[in-house]
Image (tube, grey):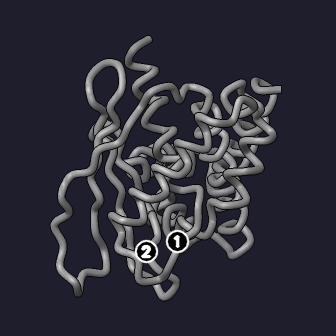
Amino acid sequence: MMKRRSWLSALVITAAAMSLPAMAQDEAPDALVKRISSDVLASVKADPAIQAGDVNRIVALVDAKILPSVNFNRMTSAAVGRFWRQATPEQQKQLQDEFKILLVRTYSGALGEVKDQTVTFKPMRSKPEDTEVIVRSEVRGKGDPIQLDYRLEKTAGGWKIYDINVLGVWLVETYRTQFAQEISAKGIDGLIASLVQRNKSNVAKTS
């Protein structure tokens, strides 16, 4: 149970870091993640409906604000890996849409677990000319600290998150292995169908 709560707590912070647009294009990546984590955690803790698990409200909130902060195209293409170039533009759009729903549903299921968690950040090692960085943090609450790191890239619209590391496991790499197995067995359309079914099952569980 404690391990499950640790994962859920980490996912909550991840959702927080992916839920608000950057304040300014020149905002430093670590400042961006710190500000968003603080703001969203405070909002979640103050909202009884989210803590009670109002899934529709949570999903609407995250879905409306997630895109400005995350490069979902890069995240999805990296998760699909070498098969991404084989997908048609329509298939790529379907993959991105379903992957987004999968992640949002996963994060929304964790929001009600927020209690007394806090986030501490480690000093960021980067150069002014860097276009990709890693922001490292720890989620602290009951139990052992949870490692939570973010990969960000610098774009014309500011820094964007494109991968997350929870307890030493990078999200994109985890899904790349799963997706490769699905595509090898059933093709790209088979992966899309699998994601659609998984998302429908998640909706049924939370209805």
- What crowding class fits label 2: few (fewer than 14 Cα within 10 Å), some (14-19), or many (20 or more)? many
Mark-to-mark CA distance, 2 and 1: 8 Å
Secondary element at tag 1: loop
Q: Give the mark, 2 or 1, whose residue is nearer the N terminus.
A: 1
Q: Amino acid at mark 2?
A: Trp
Q: Give the residue at x 20% y 52%.
A: 122
Question: In the shown orientation, is residue 63 left or right of residue 118?
Answer: right
Quickly name the residue at label 2: 159
For this view, does 59 lie left or right of residue 6? right
Circle 1 residue: 22
Write down the quadrant of residue 199 in the picture.
Answer: top right
Q: What amino acid is found at the position of numbered circle 1 in the picture?
A: Ala
Instruction: Give the residue furthest to the top.
Output: 1
Q: Quadrant of the N terminus?
A: top left
Kindly identify the residue that appears in the image at 62 percent across and 60 percent down.
Answer: 66
Q: Position of residue 166 (x, y in %)?
A: 36, 40
Discs 2/1, front: 1
**Number of callouts:** 2
